[in-house]
Amino acid sequence: MSPGRIGEVEFAGAIGRPGQAPPADLHQVAIAGRSNVGKSSLLNAVVGRKRIARVSGTPGKTREINFYAIDDRFFLVDLPGYGFARAPDSVREAWKRLIENYLSDNEWLHGLVLLLDARRGVQSADRQLLDYLGEKEIPVLIVLTKIDKLNRSGQARAIGDVREDLDLPADQVLATSARTGQGIDTLRESLLALFESEPEGEL
Ligand SMILES: Nc1nc2c(ncn2[C@@H]2O[C@H](COP(=O)(O)OP(=O)(O)OP(=O)(O)O)[C@@H](O)[C@H]2O)c(=O)[nH]1
Ligand SMILES: [Mg+2]
């Protein structure tokens, strides 16, 4: 499948409970990461629409799995954030069930973009998700967000630390900023390239 460029973007629907079906049978790439890491902002930047996904300074803004149809051909999926310290255990458990249910046996899922805050790097909740993705053999793209908050040397250090923590080759950590647009074109290309690979269910 070759999705080409991003044209029309439309909110297609949301899933709030495990087992609920996506709004359509379309190929998918999901965006995941801790609460407040910048998932919705990055999605907006990648599709070139300022406010299609809701952005908020309050962690836990996105509580459902939101599906954005691109040219009616595939979905970019905005996942609810995890690791929000002030969320009660019951809420955290519900998010985990929802996300794991979505990720497991999803024959339409080509891969996941995992966002890490450039200032925080890899946290334990990120490792848990990475372990889970490894088990399921779901391809992952590692992306640093809010890189604009660091100066040049800070940026290099942040990228180096994540590469080392995750034992990744030099070109596999992408630094981005939804604010300045840094890394967004490259991210869009890498993200679209995920659609060229086989989805999970066809492995
Ligand atoms: N400086 C800077 N701030 C950013 C960037 N991306 C997002 N933010 C800010 O970070 C906050 C959270 O952004 P969201 O896009 O809502 O984050 P999210 O990961 O979708 O959050 P949840 O839906 O709560 O999980 C907002 O105040 C954004 O304005 C960025 O690249 N640079
Ligand atoms: Mg969000």
Image (cartoon, rainbow, N blue to C red):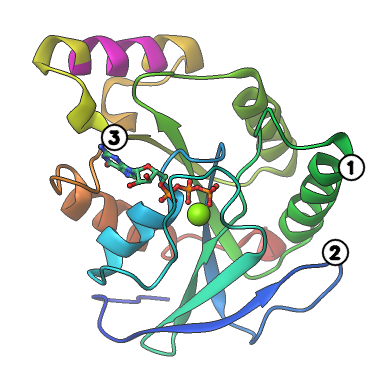
**The residue tagged with tag 2: helix, strand or loop?**
loop
Pick the front one: 1 or 18: 18
Q: Which residues are magenta?
A: 155-162
Residue drawn at x 28%, y 61% is 46
Which residue is at a point 86% across and 35% down the rendered structure image? 89
Image quarter where the C terminus lies is bottom right
Q: Is residue 157 magenta?
A: yes
Residue 32 to residue 110: above or below: above
Residue under pointer 1 = 90
Look at discs 2 and 3 and give the one toward the viewer.
3
For badge 2, the amino acid type reads Pro
Q: Quadrant of the N terminus?
A: bottom left
Please state which amino acid type lies under the numbered disc 3.
Lys
Give the image quarter of residue 188: bottom left
Q: Is mark 3 within 8 Å of ligand 1?
A: yes
Residue that carries the numbered disc 2 in the rendered image: 18
For marks 2 and 3 on the same chain, the one whose residue lies earlier in the sequence: 2
Q: Position of residue 23 (x, y in %)?
A: 65, 85
Q: Residue at x 29, y 34 (%)?
A: 146
Picture quadrant of residue 51: bottom left
Circle 3 residue: 146
Q: Please say if 121 is above or below 201.
A: above
Amino acid of disc 1:
Ser
Name the foreground residue: 136 vs 44.
44
User: Contact (CB < 8 A) between labels 1 and 3?
Assistant: no
What secondary structure characterizes most of the magenta part?
helix
Image vertical order of residue 119 relative to residue 111, above or below: above
